[in-house]
Amino acid sequence: MDRMIHTAFNSLKNIYDQRFRTSNNLANVNVPGFRRDLADESGSMNLSFDGQLSARSLGLETGKSAFSKAQGTISESGVDTDVSVVGDGYMFTQPRNGLVALSRRGDLTLDAEGTLIDGSGSQILDRGLQPIVIPSYREIQIQETGEILVDALSTPSGEFTSYGFIGTTNPDPATLFKDIDGQIRVEGGAVPAADPQVKIVQGMLEAANVNSVEELVSSMELQRQFEISIKFISLAKEIDEGGSQLMRMPQG
């Protein structure tokens, strides 16, 4: 009997993990460049008692946190500091608290110190993994190579100065995972080499690659599975209690 309950509880754990991913995807559907969370690599482990293997098994997450690499829809934003990575590749970013990460979030702006940041506050890094600081300007141009050209207020009008290149990279997709802070990084903690071949377009934004309808349908299906598992546990409890009552009946 406890095997039935164990199976149901294990199923509830899996459903909880799936609902967490679905909820996170829906919560980030409007975040530019967000990458849809996928099911983690998993396996199972047989439980043992007093050195004896049990028929019961426990589902385990055995691998990295996976995410969809598909490109989201790219549309014109009309904002000069917005950029989009076209095709494969990522920009280097420095989150407020954490290690260097990779991102396709392109809603860029300048903070109070003139440092280029994205909508989450992460600093955009150059090819040398340094923050990019830009002065007050009349006009800004961001080339396909990631080079930033600025017509600064401190220089004669129409005189553009280069303030470096947005750092980009294109690592092997198989090595990428989402870290515990939700940032994309390479397995082993290494920072991949810069790749100047990654193409960037100005004034465009890539949407999250999340299909909200699919996520909502998945959420409803998971809710049904959750309810079935709860009923299964209740049924197992009733059967167990019925068996116990039969064993306590007086012998005639």
Image (cartoon, helix red, strand yellow):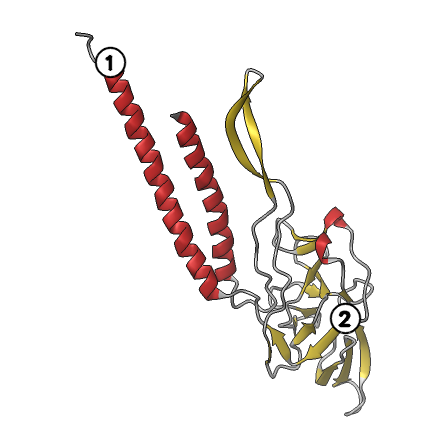
Residues 108 and 106: in front is 106
> SS of the residue at dot 2?
loop
State the residue lying farthest toward the left. Answer: 252
The location of residue 238, given as percent across then percent down, is: 28, 29
The location of residue 75, given as percent across then percent down, is: 59, 79
Local packing at callout 1 (Cα closer than 10 Å; few below 14, some 14-19, many 20+) is few
> SS of the residue at dot 1?
helix
Residue drawn at the location 81% of the way across and 64% of the way down: 194
Q: State the mark number for residue 248.
A: 1
Q: How far is the residue under mark 1 from the one under mark 2?
A: 74 Å
> Disc 1 vs disc 2: Cβ atoms closer than 8 Å?
no
Question: Relative to residue 234, is residue 45 drawn left or right?
Answer: right
State the residue lying farthest toward the front. Answer: 252
Nearer-N-terminus badge (1/2): 2
The disc labelled 2 sits on which kind of residue?
Val
Looking at the rendering, in which quadrant would you find the C terminus? Answer: top left
Task: Tell us which disc is closer to us: 1 or 2.
Answer: 1
Residue drawn at the location 76% of the way across and 82% of the way down: 150
The location of residue 15, given as percent across then percent down, is: 46, 45
Q: Is residue 75 above or below residue 209?
A: below
- Circle 2 sits on which residue? 198
Q: Is residue 247 above or below residue 17?
A: above
Residue drawn at the location 57% of the way across and 60% of the way down: 36
Residues 159 and 218: in front is 218
Question: Relative to residue 192, is residue 98 drawn left or right?
Answer: left
The location of residue 63, given as percent across then percent down, is: 64, 44
The disc labelled 1 sits on which kind of residue?
Arg
Q: State the mark number for residue 164.
A: none
Q: Quadrant of residue 167?
A: bottom right
Residue drawn at the location 66% of the way across and 82% of the way down: 80
Residues 100 and 178: in front is 178
Q: Quadrant of residue 107?
A: bottom right
